Amino acid sequence: MLKQSVILGSLTAFSLLFGTTSALAQMSHPEMERSTEQTGEFQRINQPLWLKGAVTAGGLGAIGLELWWFLLSKPKSRKASTQGGIQEITVTVDGGYEPSQIVVQTGQLVRLNFDRKDPSSCLEEVRFPHFRIAQELPLNQITSIEFTPDKPGRYEFTCGMNMFRGVVEVQSGEPTAATPVTSISKPVHPIQHL
């Protein structure tokens, strides 16, 4: 959640920067005040170089932030803990899902405890289309959703408006016999000094 507050703070700072620079850009210039006649033609507005640089840097920073947010940030993955044959994990719902990628095993009951802290209407519901589950998430309460995955795969869950997403990655519970493990031991020799 700290990263989200840093990102939101950065976006707010960029918005303030753009607002300030656009207000400065719209202020009257001495050259414009000297020209009082109305010609009906466009007049060139000369902006200071530092203002052009600030607007350009702010725009490039915002583009970089958006590219990172949508393309380069990796979802946080966590494996569900198993106790008494139940795989269980708590998912915090606050501006998205944390963790947004959950790893479980096939053939065991999965219990996802959704703790909703975000009051936005988009996050009022969570949907698991593959498991035919749609569950309301009351604010400031923990809501448990249970299902048993029968085959490996990646199963997406979304908010009610399909804007926020997460993934349940189901792995095979059996060890794979595709590659046998062989161990070759070599005798260990002490380091020889010359």
Image (cartoon, rainbow, N blue to C red):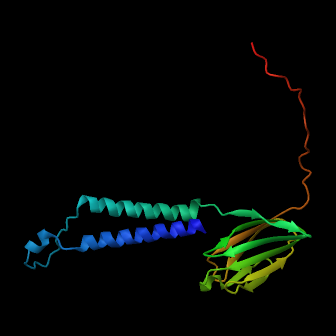
Which sits in the foreground, 87 or 42? 87
Which sits in the foreground, 13 or 105? 13
Query: Looking at the image, is 80 positioned above or below residue 128?
Result: above
On the rendered structure, is 30 left or right of 93? left
Residue 22: give x, y in percent of width and height: 30, 72
On the rendered structure, is 1 left or right of 144? left
Query: Looking at the image, is 22 positioned above or below residue 135?
Result: above
> The C terminus appears in which quarter of the rendering?
top right
Which sits in the foreground, 42 or 3? 3
Residue 45: give x, y in percent of width and height: 19, 68
Residue 183: give x, y in percent of width and height: 91, 37
Q: Residue furthest top?
A: 194
Count of all numbered marks drawn on residues in the image: 0
> The N terminus appears in which quarter of the rendering?
bottom right
Residue at 71% x, 62% y is: 77
Residue at 89% x, 26% y is: 187
Specify the quadrant of the image occupied by residue 20: bottom left
On the rendered structure, is 116 left or right of 81? left
Residue 81: give x, y in percent of width and height: 82, 66
Residue at 39% x, 63% y is: 58
Which sits in the foreground, 4 or 135? 4
On the rendered structure, is 31 left or right of 84? left
Specify the quadrant of the image occupied by residue 41: bottom left
